[in-house]
Image: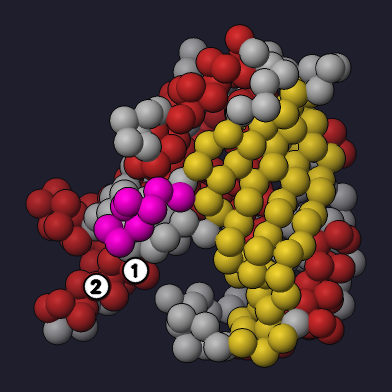
Amino acid sequence: MQTYLDYLRDILENGARKDDRTGTGTRSVFGRQLRFDLQDGFPLLTTKSVWFKGVAVELLWFLSGGTNIRPLVRRSVSIWTDWPLADYREATGDDISQDEFEQRIIEDEAFAREWGALGPVYGKQWRDFNGADQIERLVNRLCAKPHSRRHLVSAWNPAELSAQRLPPCHYAFQCWVSPEGRLSLMWQQRSVDSFLGLPFNIASYALLAHLLAAQTGYDVGELIFSGGDCHIYENHIDPVKGQLTRSPRPLPSLRIERTPDAIFDYEYEDFALEGYDPHPAIRAPIAV
């Protein structure tokens, strides 16, 4: 994962100071690409610990078509809670804690329907883009026409952007099958929180590539990130500098314990991560 560290160093050295929607401020570059050979190991960052359970549970939520945080918080995954919690506090004036809010989401289905909804975000677009189930179509076409140039899934639906609590950052991905039968995946990302978000995104799309390969009978190939506004938040600069003093360790491997009939039927317990020995986690605030 040295390529990721070089990418962070590039932003620190060449990034322009820019204001942003959150009011935090960033150092930003435009247009970068990273490549990972999935045959070399599962690209989960080792210079800090990345929470694989959160990565996997979120991806399975996307694949289920989910747009409400309730299934996430029931698995103790809080990565989407900040936005509905902020909406609830603003609308009600109730300075409820995150733990109390999530407990109400879990226990009260009506409360979850009202306050846990994020609008038509990733899961809705992947599974129901104006009536099209893009994931089902992708799997079928990868099997039937592996060398097609139309293995594309988009989460960017202009007609529904205003209804989404957060417009898609990673807005599209495309698959490609080599003559040797290796499935590669490239995703496009308009806005890249390079310290907190990108390691999650890398692992998520790596896992998706493995699931698509398992469902279609191919082996995994290359994972490619293509970013637009690639930035480091100003309040992440010191943590980034600390991370850059660390040396990468060997990558873990992913073992899929069970391959169900459909890509929508995996459970988190179907995945085993072997040999993951990262440096300690580095904490930093998320920009909401």
Magenta-drawn stretch, dominant element (helix, strand or loop): helix
Q: Residue 264: x and y, percent? A: 44, 26
Residue 25 visible: yes
Tag 2: amino acid: Asp
Tell me the distance, in whole angstroms, between the alpha carbons under discs 1 and 2. 6 Å
Indicate the position of residue 31 as horizontal and vertical percent values: 73, 64
The residue identified by callout 2 is 87
| Secondary structure type for disc 1 | helix
Q: Is residue 226 above or below residue 141?
A: below
- Quarter of the image with the N terminus is bottom right
Residue 219 vs residue 68: left or right? right
Residue 157 forms part of the magenta stretch: yes
Residue 39 in the image: x percent, y percent?
84, 33
* Label pair 1/2, CB-CB below 8 angstroms: yes
Mark 1 surroundings within 10 Å by alpha-carbon count, few (fewer than 14), some (14 through 19), many (20 or more): some
- The residue that disc 1 covers is 83
Front residue of 44/30: it is 30
Q: Residue at x 75, y 82 (%)?
A: 15
- Secondary structure state at the residue bearing disc 2: helix
Locate the C terminus and report the quarter of the image it occupies.
bottom left
**Residue drawn 37% across and 29% down?**
132
Q: Is residue 247 magenta-colored?
A: no
Residue 234 occupies which quadrant of the picture?
bottom right
Q: Which mark is residue 271?
A: none
